Image (spheres, rainbow, N blue to C red):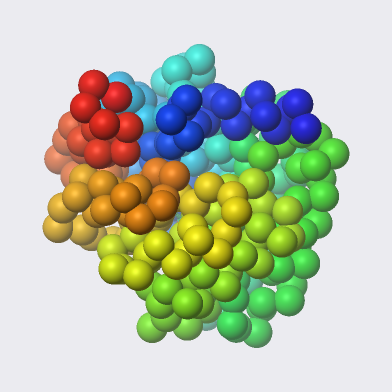
Amino acid sequence: MIGKTTRLARLFREDGRSVVIALDHGQFNGAMPGLEDMPSIVLRVVDGGADGIILNPGALERSAASYAGRCALIVRVTGASTDANPCFDYHRQILTVERAVAVGADAVIAMGFLGGPGEAASLALLAEIGESCARWGMPLVAEMLIADPKKFHDVPSIALGARVAYELGADVVKAYGGGEPTFADIPRSCPVPVLVAGGAKSENLAEMARQAVKRGAAGVAFGRTVFGTANPTDAVRALVEAVHGKGG
Ligand code: 5RP
C-alpha cells in the first residue's frame, strides 16, 4: 500500500482535504471555452494553489512544464465516448494503469455509471481498473455518475454510487450533490474521501465548497466553473481558502 499512501499524500494536504481542478472536458466536449490553450490554463490553476489537476493522457506532454513538481496529477483512464454518443454511459479504458505510472501520475480517474444500460460494463471496468491500481500502488478516483440526467444531483442515488465505488476498490470518490442540503448522506455512506464535482455553473463556488466540506466532503473537483471564468487563478484561490481555511 506504500505506493498509494505516498501518492495520496501528494494529492491531499495534512488536513485531509484537496482542491482538484478538472481540465479533462476536451475528451468529451471538445475545446470548451477556457480549454483552448492547455499549458496556459494548467499554469493558471496551478498558480492559484490547486492541489491536483485532472488531465487526459494526450494533454500531458505539452502541459507538464506547467504542473510538474507543483501539483498532483490525476490522469483519466476511461473515455472513448463523446457528447455526440447517444449512449451516455458508454465508456472504455483509454490508458493502462502501468502507463499512468510511467507518465508520473499521482492517481487515475475512471467513470462509473449507475442505473443505465451500461451499468454492468462500467462497474466491471471500474473493478478491473481497481485491481490494476492495487497492483501498481496507484490510487483510484471513481467519478460516479447517475445515468438519468434528471437524477444527477439526487443524493440517495449518489450515495449508492459512492458506496459501490468504495466496495469495488476506489480510494477516492468524485460526485455531484455538493449543493444539496442532504449532501452529508454521501460521505456518511462512503468510507473513502469524497470530492464534490462542480457542474455547469454555480452562483457562489466558494460557498458551495465551504458547505460541502462542512457536510463531510474532503474537498472539490471543479472544472467548468473554474476554467470557464475570466480569472481561473482567483477562482482557485477562493476554493483553496474555502477548503483549507484562511492562509491555506
Ligand atoms: C469531464 C468531467 C469532469 O471531470 C467533471 O464533470 C467535473 O467537472 P465540472 O465541474 O465541469 O462538472 O467528467 O467531462
Rendered residue at 40%/44% (across/down) = 219
Residue 18 image point, x, y percent: 43, 36
Whether residue 132 sits left or right of residue 187 in the image: it is: right
Rendered residue at 85%/39% (across/down) = 135
**Does residue 81 sit above or below 26 in this rendering?**
below
**Does residue 198 sit above or below 18 in this rendering?**
below
Rendered residue at 50%/15% (across/down) = 69
Residue extending furthest right?
135
Rendered residue at 60%/83% (across/down) = 116
Whether residue 132 sits left or right of residue 153 in the image: it is: right
Q: Nearer the viewer, residue 206 or 192?
A: 192
Whether residue 96 sits left or right of residue 87 in the image: it is: right
Residue 23 visible, this angle: no
Q: Nearer the viewer, residue 148 or 13?
A: 13
The quarter of the rendering in which ligand 1 is drawn is bottom left
**Does residue 162 sit above or below 60 in this rendering?**
below
Residue 225 image point, x, y percent: 26, 50
Task: Indicate the quadrant containing the N terminus: top left, top right, bottom left or bottom right.
Answer: top right
Q: Quadrant of residue 241?
A: top left
Residue 14 visible, this angle: yes
So how many labels did they put on this image? 0
Q: Nearer the viewer, residue 123 or 89?
A: 123
Whether residue 100 sits left or right of residue 237 in the image: it is: right
Residue 248 image point, x, y percent: 29, 24
